[in-house]
Image (cartoon, grey):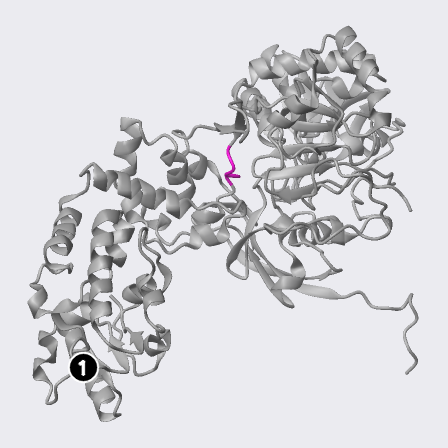
Amino acid sequence: VDAHILIVGGGGTGGALAHDLALRGLRVTLVDRGEVTSGTTGRHHGMLHSGGRYAVNDRESAVECMEENLILRRICPGSFESNDGLFVAVEDEDMEYLEPLLEGCEVAGIPAHRLTPGEALALEPNLNPELKAAVRVPDASMDAMRLPLRFFATARRNGATIRPYTEVRALLVHDHLVTGAVVVDRVTGSETQIHADVVVNAAGPWSEHVAAMAGVDVPIRPSPGVLLALRGRLCNMVINRMHKSGDGDIVVPQRSLSVVGTSSWVVEDPDDSAFPPITSRGCTPRGPSSSPPSGMPSSVPLGRPLARSSGLFVVERLEAA
Amino acid sequence: MTALTREEKTVETRHLRVYRVNSGDGDSHFDEFDVPNEAGTTLLEALRWIQLNHDRSLSLRHSCLHASCGTCGVRVNGREELACVCDLAEHGDDIRVEPLANLPTLTDLVVDMRPFYDRLPKRPLIRVSETPRTDHRFVRLEDCLECALCVSACPVVANGFAGPAALAAAARSSERDDVLAWINGPEGVWQCTTCMACVDRCPAGLDPMGSIVDMRRALVERGDVEPGVQQALQNFATQGNSYGKSAQRRARWTKGLDFTIPDAREEPVEYLWFVGDFASFDERVQRESRRLATILHDAGVSFGLLFDGERSAGNDVRQVGEQGLFETLVEHNLAAFAEARFEAIFTTDPHSLNTLRNVRSTGSTSPCTTTPSCSPTWSNTASSPWVPR
């Protein structure tokens, strides 16, 4: 009998894993308490990293990003925009990041090209005309929900069982070995056991909770953040701040939206995505409004605009006052 | 009564009635919940609050939470919305939440999207956009979120119509013969009633109806329309009405009256009555036209007609996509308006009203801008003889 793998969590990790294991001929069952991609996977800004963001401080991740970037483009054609990304230096301080960025990209195998301000503005006319330099890297926009859907669909075609709305209530443990899970069908309320040779915990920020069912401590610091989704495309390329990673340093065009990100804070419960006191609801435009956000709350200091003064691009950094 | 302290302050709530259906026996009902509501609380947050705190069996679909993925469409008090950007505060105290219409419901608020996706095979997923200042071309994802709000809102999808999103997608590859045959077929563009519900609901601000009318126009230009439509267009072209009756006979309905209605081209009147094709030529509606004329006459209202100078306002011609013929009709009516003397136009025909009031033809201004005012109130009064077609 083939080995049976039970994957807990229907996000990008679980989906890709189900696909990979099904390709290898293993029997796979994947469960998620909700719809697939309903956790953190669907909520990111939808960017395929080139690794440029990590080239300076996290070489290992940068190398992996570029390798996976090429693999994903090959196995999921049509899932990405061929838009590339720009790192943009706006202030003198940003220029200090230029050489380390170019060098880091070279070492990590990331094709990076320095552009003059004129060349960058020709590609992206909405950039702040005061920009000092730009570096072009093979970032891309992706559909954060439909890319993983391809993994689920292919895995299922290759024999995997995908069970959304199926919540793990307990893990079966025998002799210090996890041998399966007790799951509840959330629609019918019926409880069943799934036995498995291997149980994979792919629950993302909920994995601490899942691991605890087997008496295992997996310390997780769940960290939600705010993305601003603005109506209209401000740019075609992924625009990064040429600076070490921080809050509010990226704009990703997403279909007819521009997604500005991101910020983060730490919570105890990953289901707690309530805003902390620092941000305000007033700064998250909701709904298909064509008007720009009504303005940032006064408690949030605003940095210099990344772009010419459209009124939309004012977020540079969300910092505690 | 002492004032409530801060701790005791009650949380504002909204009353939600949520559609529930068991996929097993198909029995459906509404469950009621009082959900906390702060400024800006979305419907999706409220539904997830129910899931986490009250009823884990409630099924709904969501992913991005920022109107990008298109998975959380529901009907809120009968109107399609993405739950993630639906502000509870805008929907009153009693909010009814149901799954999208025109797609099979799987459980609760989750619909089966397969019939919708199955109609998108001819759709190119990506498209090319250009930057204004270079010839650089970025291949990008389409704006359509594939959320199916338009399909739920469309009144003719239930008749087998392919739906706004699929047809708008087909418009981008309408140079292909197989796509052209499909859009011209029974599922295709001719079923659209141009009601604009799809445009109204689209969370991405797109205009699927415009794409449908564009495709009709392309088909008409190719002469690729069914014989009935062809005949009607021929009638508009030769006689200025869909009946194919002589333009000279347009005011024959006035014959049975015991008074004479002035010709606004010959004597000044206060109101010009734009009668329209149906009220002029259809025998049942003619009776109503005579009744209204009698009422106006008895009330001492100064009104007149254009008689044989009036042509169809061209509402249907335009929506079929025969833009050239529409322009011809508009020009003819504009010339007749210029010849007449009046202070305002009224009509009892809603199709004429739509065209006169809302449509700006290319190359000329709306007829309404050439006259002091149009008077939509006339078609809304209780005495209106408007007979729905």
Question: Is residue B338 something that shows in the picture?
Answer: yes
The spot of residue B336 in percent (x, y) is 20, 67
Quadrant of the snapshot with the C terminus of chain B: bottom left
Instruction: Please give the range of residues in magenta.
Output: B142-146
Magenta span contains residue B145 = yes
Magenta span contains residue A203 = no
Relative to residue B199, is residue A261 depicted above or below?
A: above
The quadrant in which residue B216 appears is top left
Quadrant of the snapshot with the N terminus of chain B: bottom right
Question: Is residue A167 something that shows in the picture?
Answer: no
Badge 1 sits on which subunit? B
The spot of residue B129 in percent (x, y) is 50, 29
The quadrant in which residue B346 appears is bottom left
The spot of residue B202 in percent (x, y) is 50, 48
Left or right: B256 in relation to B348: left
Residue matched to label 1: B267
Count of picture labels: 1
- Using the image as rendered, state which of residue B23 and residue A312 is in the foreground: A312
Which kind of residue does numbered mark 1 sit on?
Glu
Relative to residue B157, is residue A270 depicted above or below?
A: above
Relative to residue A96, is residue A284 depicted above or below?
A: below
Could you tell me what secondary structure mostly forms the magenta stretch? loop
The quadrant in which residue B212 appears is top left
Left or right: B76 in relation to A294: left
